[in-house]
Image (spheres, helix red, strand yellow):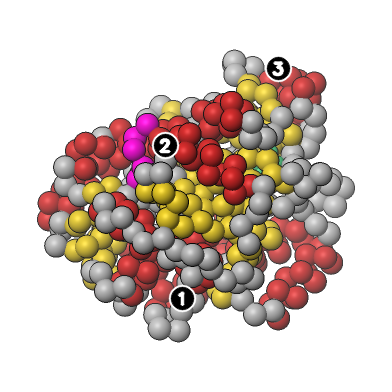
Amino acid sequence: MVDALVLDARLRQSLVAVRSLGRSGLTVAAAAAQPTATVPAFRSRWCASGLALTDPGSEAAFVQALCRLLEQHPARVVLVSHDGAIAAIQRHREQVQRRACVALAAPEATAQAVNKAATLALADRLGIPTPRGVPVDGADPSEAARTVAAEVGFPAVVKPLESWMQANGVATRQSCEDVVDRTEAERAIDRVWRAGGQVVVQEWLPGDREAVSLVRDGDRVVAAFAQVAHRMHPPIGGSSVLRESIPLPDDATPMARRLLEAMGLDGYAEVEFRRDRQGRPVLMEVNPRLSASVEVAVRAGVDFPLLLYRWALGDAPASVDGYRHGVRMRWLGGDMKWLARNVLRDPTRARPDVVAPARAMATFLRDSLRPAAYDYLDRDDPWPAILQGALLPWNAWRVMATHLRAARRPWTSPHETAGRAA
Ligand SMILES: Nc1ncnc2c1ncn2[C@@H]1O[C@H](COP(=O)(O)OP(=O)(O)O)[C@@H](O)[C@H]1O
Ligand SMILES: [Mg+2]
């Protein structure tokens, strides 16, 4: 029996979890959808076995395969980070929990956190600021876009209420998208509706993106950590490309604590904020799972994967007091895509969070010279980074192909990810 089975091994946070748990002496297995030859976490010296698992596109098949896997390779704790895998496990929680401890909060709290309507409604009741927005539903995207123009204005952010959705038996992950006029709003709303999702359209907030991460164990806050994302790719709705640990913000931290307490959300959660023009924190969402940016916390001294593992076992983890501020982490692949996106932008059209090519190049160069840790890179565990480096030409081709396809078929979007655990 292994101590932990880390699902969604293709994700960066899963590699971080494999390393954290392995370093602290635990035996760790990891699982990912095919093709398993391209999974960096499987190359980690801390990964005892790399296992193939169905992707969560079909929930019932995924859970069945997971249960079979747990019978053949028993594990004490299952860690899960992909929205699709979480949706599948939520629906069949008891089946999985009979075989291992699932490192997720209680089903009701998890359900409230993954649904932005429920999260934002709770925040409103608690007096925590949320973006001005309108829910849009109905059958006519052009009518919806008119409502957005009248009630929100542009630029705006088209946001699925849940990231993981299904339509006609096809599951996809849909992310937020910035829109600058009615045509774009119509297309973005239509994209989410067609994929089977519901939509809220929010005003665009221009300030800092800060996240407060907490581990709660009953009424006790075991650890608290804050980071700022200096940039993201895609600029709206993407992953952070450069992030830095910061002191716990006086205003956002109590909000995060109150929100999670009201949800009854134990275990790990990351509460995301963005500041408005006046610098006030406004709630974006709650992620009840490890996110790609968790490594900056680990490097700054808060080992969230290990705390989450202990919490899942009911081990009452010891409290963590403080962490190092100013620890920077960069995702080089993402930063290269961010640079390409800014350099190749349409100069006739201002977009939120997109900067001029000269400024993007200067920022990229400056940050290449400043010290930072890099995603995947670890001197004691080099193979995941070597594999990722070797895959760079293949990944670059895939990104280019997606953009070419989108240019030929304007209804496809980089804000849509197929139902694989990618
Ligand atoms: N109303 C908004 N104004 C400005 N930026 C936004 C807004 N909504 C989302 N974003 C950006 O997009 C990111 C993703 O949005 P989020 O609500 O966290 O959804 P998800 O991560 O599930 O796609 C946020 O972290 C933020 O950087
Ligand atoms: Mg988010």
Judged by depth in the image, the label closer to the viewer, 2 or 3, is 2
Judged by depth in the image, the label closer to the viewer, 1 or 3, is 1
Main secondary structure of the magenta stretch: loop
How far from the left and from the top, in percent, is residue 236?
Answer: 66, 47
Q: Does the numbered disc 2 mark a residue whose Cβ is under 8 Å from ligand 2?
A: no
Residue numbers of the magenta segment: 104-108
Q: Which residue is drawn at 59% across and 45% down?
A: 254
Within 10 Å of disc 2 (Cα), the crowding (few <14, some 14-19, many 20+) is: some
On screen, 134 above or below 285?
above
| Residue 5 included in the magenta stretch of the image | no
Q: Which of 15 and 287 is in front in this view?
A: 287
Q: What residue type is labelled 2?
A: Gly
The disc at residue 143 is 3
Residue position for label 1:
385
Within 10 Å of disc 1 (Cα), the crowding (few <14, some 14-19, many 20+) is: many
On screen, 29 above or below 97?
below
At numbered mark 3, what does the secondary structure look like: helix, strand or loop?
helix
Q: Residue at x 76, y 27 (%)?
A: 152
Q: Which of 398 and 317 is in front in this view?
A: 317
Distance from label 1 to label 2 (Cα)? 38 Å
Q: Residue at x 69, y 44 (%)?
A: 281
How far from the left and from the top, in percent, is residue 48?
Answer: 24, 71
Apparent side of residue 72 relative to residue 132 in the rendered image (left or right) = left
Quadrant of the image occupied by residue 241? bottom right
The reply to whether discs 2 and 3 touch (Cβ–Cβ < 8 Å) is no
How far from the left and from the top, in percent, is residue 218?
Answer: 37, 44
The disc at residue 264 is 2
Mark before the other along the chain sequence, 2 or 3: 3
